[in-house]
Image: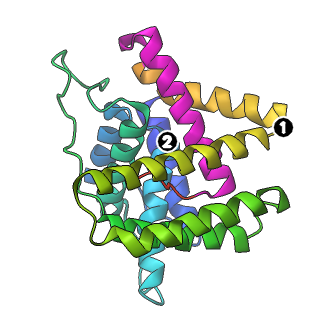
Amino acid sequence: MEIAEYCREIETHLCRKNDGHLIRVTGPSFTLVAGWAAQGVPIKIAFAGIDRYFERYYRKGPRRRPVKIDFCEADVLDVFDEWRRATGLTAASPASDGDGDAQTPEPRRGPSLPAHLERVVMRLSSARAGGTLGEAFDDLIDRVAHHLDAARAEARGLRGEARDRLIERLAALDRELLDHARVALDPETRRAMEREAEEELAPFRMSMPAEGYARARESALDRLVRERFRLPTIAFH
């Protein structure tokens, strides 16, 4: 995607989030968004960052003024960091000059383990209540919820190997939930998601070994599956 088109897409998405109020992406804002494109931030990852900012903004009560794209920068870069860690691209960027980390933002510190578990339980309950999971998920969701409740009870005081074992259990639950969701996809939807995952990775493709690209593609597909079913990320990093 050309930078000008990328900026137009961001402007259009921002307009939708602002209930139709148009805030132009020009001048310093254009430079900011063009920088995201140069770093290889996929357009849907940028959208997700903007959405994250608006979610927090809505929680503060009635809005008083339209949001400028500049306010969303930290959230866009946070989501980009998360996406790169998930796909194994933390040391690669199309904007790098060959040393592997040029123009790569520093990863931001995430929530504590107890806070992470609390957020996972809330999002899982929200996904179930919203009807995105369907009855086929019920038994699995019940079991996952039971494990999460137990994990919340023990997480605050855990240290060392005990904490590591809990994190391993969370990763296994996350994988099981994603695998279950993948099976629920019809073939046409899965093919469309695979194409989208490949498009996200296109700026990085030439600099990646085949094995690394295959892993990144699967991780990108996981993100799209998670997004479709509104699944929380149970794994803790």
Q: Is residue 13 above or below residue 30?
A: below
Label 1: which secondary element: loop
Residue 91: x and y in percent read 26, 27
Per the rendered image, the range of residues in magenta is 205-231
> Residue at point 19% right, 44% down?
106
Q: Nearer the viewer, residue 149 or 49?
A: 149
Residue identifier under label 2: 43
> Residue at point 44% right, 44% down?
7
Q: Nearer the viewer, mark 2 or mark 1?
A: 1
Label 2: which secondary element: helix
Circles 2 and 1: CB distance less than 8 Å? no
> Residue at point 52% right, 72% down?
149
Left or right: 52 in relation to 185: left
- Does the stretch in magenta take in 211? yes
Amino acid at the residue labelled 2 = Ile
Residue extending farthest to the front is 162
Earlier residue among tags 2 and 1: 2
Residue identifier under label 1: 186
Residue 82: x and y in percent read 38, 46
Q: CA distance from mark 2 to mark 1?
A: 25 Å
Left or right: 174 in relation to 32: right
The answer to whether residue 90 of the structure is visible from this angle is yes
Q: Nearer the viewer, residue 125 or 220?
A: 125
Residue 88: x and y in percent read 37, 30
| Residue 162, image quadrant | bottom left
- Does the stretch in magenta take in 232? no
Residue extending farthest to the bottom is 62
| Residue 155, image quadrant | bottom left
Left or right: 192 in relation to 153: right
Amino acid at the residue labelled 1 = Asp
SS assignment for the magenta stretch, majority? helix
